[in-house]
Amino acid sequence: MKLSTHVQGEFTIAVIGETRMDAAVAPELKHQISQLLNDGATRIVLDLSAVTFMDSSSLGALVSLLKMVGNRGDLIIAGSKGIVADLFKLTRMDRVFRMADSVDAALGAVAA
Amino acid sequence: METIYQQYNIRLSIDSRLDQVRVLSGALRGIGKELELSDEKLGQLELMMVEAVNNVIEHAYQMQGGNDVRVRVEYSPAEVNLIISDSGRTMPASLHSEVREMPDPDDLPEGGWGMGLIQLLADSIRYNIDATGNHLHVNKLLA
């Protein structure tokens, strides 16, 4: 799975470079983000703005990552739209994750 | 010239492997675009189909490849029916004949949303078993 990362202030911005997050890629997604956590990143913004489809297996992988972050840091979901945003709302997991319209909005919200 | 849509009955099938599901999604999106479905309806249909097919692969076939997952797409201007069929283990009645409560978000669930999502997004669902296998019928009105 294509994932690019860069650091912006205290945050690691992880950009999903795929249009699709499904059960076939969920384990790799989990592995790659957990690697970032193991490498010391604690405040992560996950940029989903390129993602046009996501299923509940990938959502489950994100929840397991949220548990790994725990109260040591942040996992902010940025840029979800369309059916991807709907998936968070329908499952009510938009209440559990910190959601932002974009990476800039996520960083601004934290700075504010 | 104005296009007049008739009814379509399209049959797709994949091997029971999760890496095959994206191709099925691509086929459904292609069908939806050709039939000029809205992005919203198409996204909902794709999510319902993928959740149903993932369930078949994970539960009916217990993640064993080499089995057939069949999807029939019935289109008319008023509605779309997706019929997802398998020849594996039958789904427990509690999963399709009762209203599924979504897992409590505060419990930080990592799964268990599939049938609940299908029930929320569909206008109706039905599950039947016959000599050819198990069939989940998912209806979505287009009006």
Image (cartoon, coloured by chain):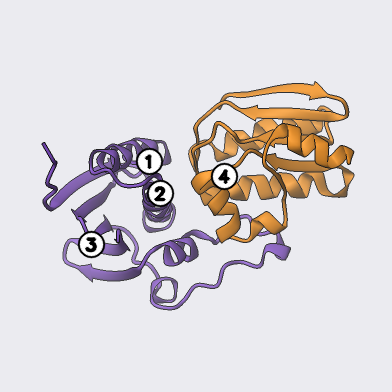
Chain colours: A orange, B purple
Residue A58 shows which numbered tag?
4
Confirm or deny contact between disc 1 and disc 2 (CB under 8 A): yes
Q: Label 2 is placed on what type of residue?
A: Val
The amino acid beneath tag 3 is: Gly
The residue depicted at 74 percent of the width and 47 percent of the height is A66
| Mark sitting on residue B50 | 2
Q: Is residue B125 left or right of residue A42?
A: left
Q: How dense is the environment of label 1, judged by Cα within 10 Å: few (below 14), some, or many (20 and up)?
A: many
The residue positioned 44% from the left and 71% from the top of the image is: B95
Q: Do the residues at pointers 2 and 3 share their chain? A: yes
- Determine the secondary structure under disc 3: strand
Above or below, B47 relative to A48: below
Q: Residue B133's mark? A: 3
Front-lying residue, B64 or B1:
B1
Q: Quadrant of residue A35?
A: top right
The chain that hosts pointer 4 is: A
> What's the CA distance linking mark 4 and mark 1?
14 Å
The reply to whether the C-beta atoms of the residues labelled 2 and 3 are less than 8 Å apart is no
Q: Nearer the viewer, mark 1 or mark 3?
A: 1
- Numbered label attached to residue A41: none
Report how far apart the C-alphas of labels 1 and 2 lie in the structure.
Answer: 7 Å
